[in-house]
Image (cartoon, coloured by chain):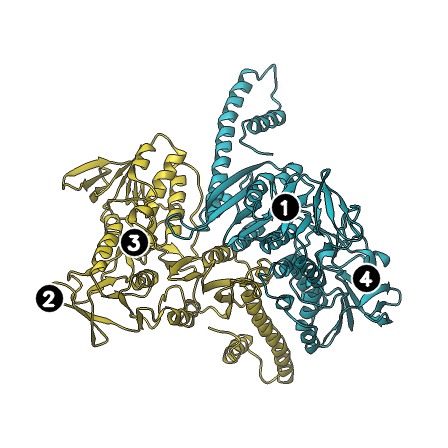
Chain colours: A yellow, B cyan
Amino acid sequence: MNIVVIGGGASGLTTASNIRKYNKDVQIIVFTTQKNVAYSPCAIPYVIGGHIDSFDDIIMHKPEEYMSKDIRIMTESRVTEIDHDNTEITYEDKDGNKQNIKYDKLVIATGGKPLMPPIPGKDLEGVFKVRTIEDGEEILAYSEKSKNVVLVGGGAIGLELGSELAHKGLNVTIAEMMPQLFPRSFDKEMSDKFQEHLQGKNIKILTGSAVESINGETKVESVTIDGEVQPADMVILSTGVRPQTELAESIGCELGKFAIKVNSHMETSVENVYAVGDCVEVIDAITGQITLSPLGTTAVRQGIILAKHLTGHEIEFKPVLNSTVSQIGIMEMGAVGITQQSAQKEGIDVVVSNIDTLSRARYYPGSKPLHIKLISKLDGTIIGCQMFGQEAVAERVDTMTAIMSQKLKCDEVVSMVIDPIAQAAANCLEQIEAIESEINSSCCEVKEESTDAEEDKPVDDTSENLSFTESLRAQGLIQK
Amino acid sequence: MNIVVIGGGASGLTTASNIRKYNKDVQIIVFTTQKNVAYSPCAIPYVIGGHIDSFDDIIMHKPEEYMSKDIRIMTESRVTEIDHDNTEITYEDKDGNKQNIKYDKLVIATGGKPLMPPIPGKDLEGVFKVRTIEDGEEILAYSEKSKNVVLVGGGAIGLELGSELAHKGLNVTIAEMMPQLFPRSFDKEMSDKFQEHLQGKNIKILTGSAVESINGETKVESVTIDGEVQPADMVILSTGVRPQTELAESIGCELGKFAIKVNSHMETSVENVYAVGDCVEVIDAITGQITLSPLGTTAVRQGIILAKHLTGHEIEFKPVLNSTVSQIGIMEMGAVGITQQSAQKEGIDVVVSNIDTLSRARYYPGSKPLHIKLISKLDGTIIGCQMFGQEAVAERVDTMTAIMSQKLKCDEVVSMVIDPIAQAAANCLEQIEAIESEINSSCCEVKEESTDAEEDKPVDDTSENLSFTESLRAQGLIQK
């Protein structure tokens, strides 16, 4: 059997190496347009900033290592066409030669493509995207001769890279169109707090700001932001990625709301064609809605599940919690689940705990500030957590991922963990209990009222409850 | 209603303050023999070692703060007798005056008492125990004029205090009778590893070593360990605690295997009498066996549950996982669940992963060594985790506590967390899969055999499986 994998990122390689783990006989061939495989794209900013010595350090495995496990890796090779009727793909190697190869099973792991916002001047010399090691190498080289850099987009990559370039001594401007940084993972009051920590030290952060044009003759000379021209030698676009679905579409794989549609075994709508990684859409564990989850953890999980499926070990891919962590200067940020803002959009009533605490027992030396926001449904189920601090945030995100994957409630968390997370859970719990006692006392009042007025005014329980919920909301007891 | 709480430790005070949270009217009075309440006993070693400035820093709340919440705290007062027929206790205040007080509900939170091993010379001047702030103050004062100190007992407190005293420049000997350090929470190969890290720097560690006598005229002059006399100015007994159950016994509260027996609402066998904290026994979540859990987390959880019970909010106290963390010099140690050794005693077949890894992605600077031992049942359920390293061990213990409380399996953990814990889980999973494929291939063989010999030799499946398990064990595939 021949298995062809298109894409050498986390999902494609995990699929390939896990298939080999369970089956020594199938042929496996992986195509990638890049020179390198098995590197950590999340680490690119830290090589640029000099915290990691070289790009070689972030490559976990060389293609040769896969070869030795009998997995063929075709680097710098682009799959240009799929002929599914003849179960054959066409690829172009780095010298432009075209060849065909047959498959029995086809794995589409084409990942995401940087979103290129339609800003005038985006094709000038000195404008970069950040996706591959090659991108990283170009940015590193160009930054050596630059003074002023503008990053378009204030998500994780924009902030990480901005902080690293500022660390190198460049004047950094980060421009985010939304009214806050990191909007996918954090609510505004949290991002406002860390924005304050990030400002200064060669970094200017502009939120709610549009980059109107990138200006220059042949290369970047300045940037117009909110009508104001400011000097710039280089511009880095970190405005996110969009799923790369063209090849899948070309053979009729059904797309969903955002990307390739797959079932819980990573099967597309086309027989013997599978898809994993940033090019597929997933279900959000909290809202049940279709969403994207362009994260390494999701890609790895999908690769494992597909490999098991292809070798006869069935486990299901479950809805995702989208846990994310980021190191920005000395600050660690992490989030899991949904934001309060998303809960609001989904119509979920929540209580929220926002605590500014310390990373260790307060008396213990070396303790560092830690900010936690916990979002809980009114039944106590925790649906979101946002944190930032200077140590062990990633480990706390893991704890919360385990807790939220099991739909644990605040009262269970209070006495389960030693961590300040327990304080935040206790705080949510107190609010819920206050609401409950308010409801109980109000129910009694309602009962009395309805007894008084029983005959002439039958009480509509639903509308009563509804307006009561509204009144709790007005009192600030529920947040929606 | 009058609620009398005997004991001002974590369990007693948590009970008192949580009762007040839910009920503003009941009378609450707490008796403690100590001068201080609401301090962190776990922090005492670090005050002695100078890492925390003073004992005042580890006191979270003063008695006055409880008074302001209408909780009476009677410090330096010993409850000497309970007359349950007349629902009355007798206590002796610090001036030796005896008084009685009536109760409707009685909470026994008498905690543990340091175990005093029957070593000749244990009553000499210069021999200390470590339990209260007063003990800490005495040790601190005496250590200022001492050069050589011997700690009897190599559990958490012994190691923490030993490391702190060495940090102050004293010559420290830690003598542990068992063949390893920290035997309750760690297996020998793990404790051997951290023993190596701890040795040196003014610390000598002796395992499998008995302190035969403490020698001196009126005060400690030397200690005889394994027949050898060595100089010592002070000796600290850190050989654990035993539950203090005398008062409960005096009114007929049923004792179990180790301590006061309570149900999941913290009720003793005597009506209107409850018990919480180190003086009660609990159920081990992994083995289902009765055990002790003298931990702050357990005490707090029991206090919350009892307070809820007494105010009409029922939740149940569940079996414990005994998560424990300790900071010893720059080393953080943590464990949760049971050791491999305990699994062996319980007859549980396990696979074990022992990995020496790094606390962060290997390319990332500042990464520190991290040692993880994971113990999994053959169905993949994780039943034990032991770790030591230099950062974020406590947070990882929380993650594992959440995972193990939900009886999650290795395959779920592999793709749930970002942490090196996932590596260890993957490693266990590989072993389990190897065993399964061994079983599968062997089952086929067995089938063929039994077909051949069907008539004259009926196969006893049980014994076949049994001997097969034995053969896996012999091959080192299963560890028991």
In percent of width and height, residue B147 lies at 66, 52
Kindly report which numbered mark, 2 or 4, lies closer to the viewer in this rendering: 2
Q: How dense is the environment of label 4, judged by Cα within 10 Å: few (below 14), some, or many (20 and up)?
A: few
Q: Which residue is mark 1?
A: B182
Q: Nearer the viewer, residue A449 or A474?
A: A474
Q: Nearer the viewer, residue B261 or B396?
A: B396
| Amino acid of disc 4 | Glu
- Considering only vertical position in the picture, is B25 above or below B228? below
Q: Secondary structure at mark 3?
A: loop
Q: Which residue is mark 3?
A: A255
Closer to the chain start, of discs 3 and 2, is 2
Do the residues marked 4 and 3 share a common chain? no
| Amino acid of disc 1 | Phe
Q: Which chain letter matches label 2?
A: A
Do the residues marked 2 and 4 share a common chain? no
- Judge left or right: residue A448 versus residue A342: right
Q: Secondary structure at mark 4?
A: loop
Q: Secondary structure at mark 2?
A: loop
| Amino acid of disc 2 | Glu
Q: CA distance from mark 3 to mark 2?
A: 41 Å
Which of the 4 image quadrants contains residue B289?
top right
Q: Which chain letter matches label 1?
A: B
Kindly report which numbered mark, 1 or 2, lies closer to the viewer in this rendering: 1
Q: Nearer the viewer, residue A467 or B269?
A: B269
Q: Is residue B472 visible?
A: yes
Pointer 3 with pointer 1, Cβ within 8 A: no
**Residue B94, which numbered label?**
none
- Judge left or right: residue B8 versus residue A351: right
